[in-house]
Image (cartoon, rainbow, N blue to C red):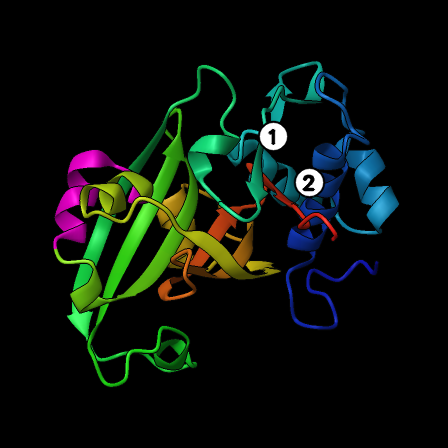
Amino acid sequence: MSSQTRSPSGYSTWRLIAEGLRRDILDGAAPSGSRLPSENELAARFGVHRNTVRQAVSALTAEGLVDSRRGSGTFVAAHGTLVHRIGTRTRLSDSLREGSVASGQLLECAVEPAPPAGIAARLRLDGRPALRLELVRSVNGVPVSRATQWYAADSVPGLPKQFAALGTITGALHALGITDYVRASTSVGGRHATPEESEDLGLPVGSVVLEVRALDALPDGTPLQFGVTRFAASRVELDVEHPASG
């Protein structure tokens, strides 16, 4: 990596350094309690100025991944990454450790014409309006995901009210008589959070999110919900389960 402050692609070098260090921490290459190399050592490793390294480490500190101790250095903080399992029946509550508590916040809801990108077709709306929900899910008070979900509005009357009261989509659907649903398709990608997503998730600018685009259906195959969920990559690991063969 060159000593310039921006990569050839135009992306800030400090963010690339932060990504590399973040990956080391989450993969276990830099375990909890271990000391990061000094600013001088990291600057030499990446071929950049100390100020660039300082920006990267500050971003990791804001995410709670490292602690800076005056006179001692910077150490990898204890962190408990949530392993969220994506399978036939995908529920955040099923991925929680014992003693953990999940909660949900409804940011916005609207009944509107079906949005583009094939959502109307995937939900088989046939001209019916869509219900859009904007949600933030937290575990033990820490935001872990920011989701946008669409439903056929006439299939889930009162869903926003039920979610606001119960704090979970599964509970809200159950209250409406929808007692089971299954995952029909899932795609996963990674990107940098937008400013709005960073604010909603309490992440520093430049943080990475895992974007999951998923279709859920009723057991008989009727589409129920299409959602785009952005998980904070520093807080959540996705475990995609494969159906048993045969």
Where is residue 34? Give x, y as percent: 77, 19
Amino acid type assigned to the residue bearing label 2 in the image: Arg
**Residue 115 position in % (x across, y down):** 31, 78
In the image, residue 118 lies in the stretch drawn in magenta: no
Mark 2 is surrounded, within 10 Å at the Cα level, by few (under 14), some (14 to 19) or many (20 or more) other residues, namely: many
Q: Residue most toward the bottom?
A: 127
Which residue is drawn at the image coordinates 43% and 45% (left, top)?
145
Give the distance between the C-alpha atoms of the residues marked 2 and 1, in whole angstroms: 8 Å
Residue 238 position in % (x across, y down): 61, 44
Residues shaded magenta: 158-169
**Can you say which quadrant of the picture contains the N terminus?**
bottom right
Given residues 151 and 178, the one toward you in this image is: 178
Residue at horizontal 54%, vertical 29%?
A: 64
Name the residue nearer the viewer: 84 or 21: 84
Give the total of numbered labels.
2
**Farthest residue in the right direction?**
45
Residue at the image point whose x is 69% and y is 21% from the top:
75
Residue 14 horizontal side relative to residue 139, left or right: right
Amino acid type indicated by mark 1: Leu
Left or right, residue 183 beside residue 112? right
Question: On the image, numbered disc 2 is attached to which residue?
Answer: 22
Q: Earlier in the sequence, mark 2 or mark 1?
A: 2
Q: Tag 1's secondary structure?
A: loop
Find numbered disc 2 in the image and state the secondary structure of the residue it sits on.
helix
CB-based contact (under 8 Å), mark 2 and mark 1: yes
Residue 180 lies, with reference to residue 194, above or below; the image says above
Judge whether residue 163 is colored magenta. yes
Residue ID at (31%, 50%): 135
Q: Which mark is residue 65?
A: 1
Instruction: Classify residue 42 by image quadrant.
Output: top right
The image quadrant that residue 23 belongs to is: top right
